[in-house]
Amino acid sequence: MNATDEWARSEILNALKMALPSESFCWPTLAERFGFDLQALAEPDGVVPFRATTAVFEHVAEVLQDDAALFDIFHEMNLGKFTLYDYLFVCAPTLRDGCLAWKRFLAMRTNCVSLTFTEDDSTGTLEWVIPPRLGNYTQNMFARIGWSVKRVETALDQSPAPVRIELIANAPSKTSRLQERYGDRIKFGQSRNCLVFSKEVLSQAPKRNDENLYSIIQKAACEEQASFAQRGSPLCRIADEISETMKTGTCSLQTVASNLGISQRSIQRLLAEEGTSFRQMTEEIRRSAAGRYLRETNLPMKEIAFLLGFSEISTFSRAVKSWYGQPPKEIRRTISGS
């Protein structure tokens, strides 16, 4: 992916601009120095170069002489600052669904950072994958953690939230209020940037959950993501093509590559750069779609299995149970309340 095509929503810089003392920062000068359009910050669908956002965040920490300040600046931002992306988590049926929604819809926030969500027998991990080519993103990552942890706290109405934080960066020289609050549950110098939840926490319902409202939020998010997908993100195009070929039972690396008009090797390289693979992405899309079909539609099990590329209902049922810990009928019964 060309560096000039790597973007982030301008809201993130606008949120930072509004949170900082105006007398300390001249934003027209910052826009010229770091190469972004200042006007884009006021546009709801504006974008700026991703590298500009990371450079500005590093600069802000230097000017403030506080390399931990971004934790608190973004942790203290009110709910709704990032519109739909905020509510996709705090209004989800469970925290697990919220994590999956963040993963699914991150492409409407940026086209060069990805989220993975994995579970083992006892925990679930939401991990940010930022390609090394994007340079120093330490302060940007501190901001992401501050913001996301506050959303977990809001969802559960609990502070500190029952979550463990791991960061690749070394510990800052200063100490933020967020660090004080989470103590030894925030670890620096790790191998990944992530939030780690227990299985029990992932199954909890956010206090603001509302099934009808969440359906509206998801629909709006799909429309917004479709709009941003037009900006040319290869990952969005690959994900969309996987979803479509899955419905026809023709989902394979060869078919997706042929339909997109790019080589199989190029797809594998693009996905590897984002820390995933064709198999992993297909599995994640299939899992997410299964949850949506079971919770949000009345489609027969046989039809859902077909739409997900399963030839046998028994295979579909085993897959759903491995993903969610419950068979398909139990998931639907829980949602319907019958």
Image (tube, rainbow, N blue to C red):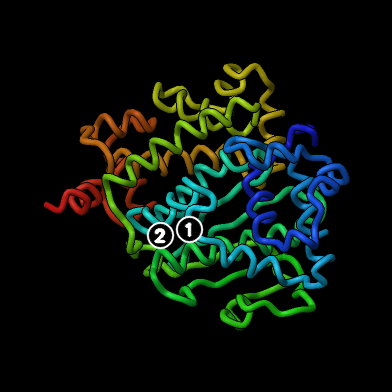
Q: Amino acid at mark 2?
A: Leu
Q: What is the number of the mark on residue 38?
A: none
Residue 106 in the image: x percent, y percent? 56, 44
Residue 225 in the image: x percent, y percent? 52, 34
Q: Earlier in the sequence, mark 1 or mark 2?
A: 1
Looking at this view, is 23 or 2 the one in front? 23
Instruction: Give the tally of numbered discs.
Output: 2
Residue 299 in the image: x percent, y percent? 23, 32
Secondary element type, mark 2: helix
Does the residue at mark 1 contact the one at mark 2 (Cβ under 8 Å)?
Answer: no
Q: Residue at x 35, y 29 (%)?
A: 307
On the picture, is 89 further left or further right than 272?
left
Pointer 1 residue:
79
Looking at this view, is 156 or 113 the one in front? 156
Pointer 2 residue:
95
Between the residue at mark 1 and the residue at mark 2, the CA separation in whole angstroms equals 16 Å
Q: Residue at x 56, y 39 (%)?
A: 108
Q: Amino acid at mark 1?
A: Leu
CA neighbours of label 2 inside 10 A, class few (<14), some (14 to 19), many (20+): many
Residue 192 visible in this rendered orientation of the protein: no
On the image, which quarter does residue 32 sit in? top right
